Amino acid sequence: MATSSPRATTINAAATRRPRVRELAAQATQENILRAATKVFAKHGFAGGRIEQISKAAKSHDRMIYYYFGNKEELFIAVIEETYRRFNDAESKVVLKMDDPVDDLKTLVRFMWTYYQQHPEFITLLNSENLHRGKHISKSLRAREYSSPAISLMNRVLKSGAEKGLFRSDVRARDIYLMSAALAYFYVSNRFTLSAFLGEDLEAPVAIAHWEEFITSAVIRQVSIM
């Protein structure tokens, strides 16, 4: 029986590795571009962010952006999608007890509040897209899939609370999710102008702690059986 020579085996192994190496290199390039684009678009918005700024920040070339993403709009959509994906990934790691609906609901609200503070790019990117009336993200084929897990998790907690006689059964998970997001998002996105308007530092630790408690209490009151 004929056997492969060591040289032939080495050549075959190298040939197998090469596509994998190229695949990893391509993936790394795309990830670098996305990270750079996130920073540029978060700082300058869609209109102000330029391809040459992004390629420079990614230590890449303009042609690589066009090769992988097509054009500036498609890249912006990819950035928004990736931003939502990271939010979902973080939320999926939230640990819930599932035997204490009140505590679990507070945990979900606090997660959202904390995430917005720790990821200001999430706020600025969404602000930029809303200035464009959502015309870019509306073209995304993946945007809707990112909302389902978040609403589903909120629904499970509310359903558990209703079954235990703690929460109202007529409350929609979508409404409580929007309420939580609105109370957290508005504070974070407008903290600088509101600080000037109100004459107090809304970034002070005591102010932040107060608003966290206010949000969680407001949400619990909204869903609790009176």
Image (cartoon, helix red, strand yellow):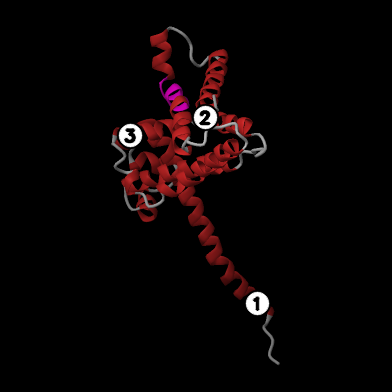
| Disc 1 from disc 3: Cα separation | 57 Å
| Disc 3 from disc 2: Cα separation | 29 Å
Q: What residue would you read off at disc 1?
A: 9
Kind of element beneath mark 3: helix
| Disc 1 from disc 2: Cα separation | 66 Å
Along the polypeptide, which appears first: circle 1 or circle 2?
1
Residue 217: % across, % down = 55, 22
Inspect the image, locate mark 2, and give the three-letter code of the amino acid beneath it: Val
Mark 3 surroundings within 10 Å by alpha-carbon count, few (fewer than 14), some (14 through 19), many (20 or more): few
Residue 170: % across, % down = 48, 36
Q: What residue would you read off at disc 3?
A: 130
Q: Residue at x 57, y 18 (%)?
A: 209
Inspect the image, locate mark 3, and give the three-letter code of the amino acid beneath it: Asn
The dot on residue 223 is 2
Q: Which stretch is magenta?
A: 184-190
Vertical side of 143 occupied by 188: above or below: above
Along the polypeptide, which appears first: circle 1 or circle 3?
1
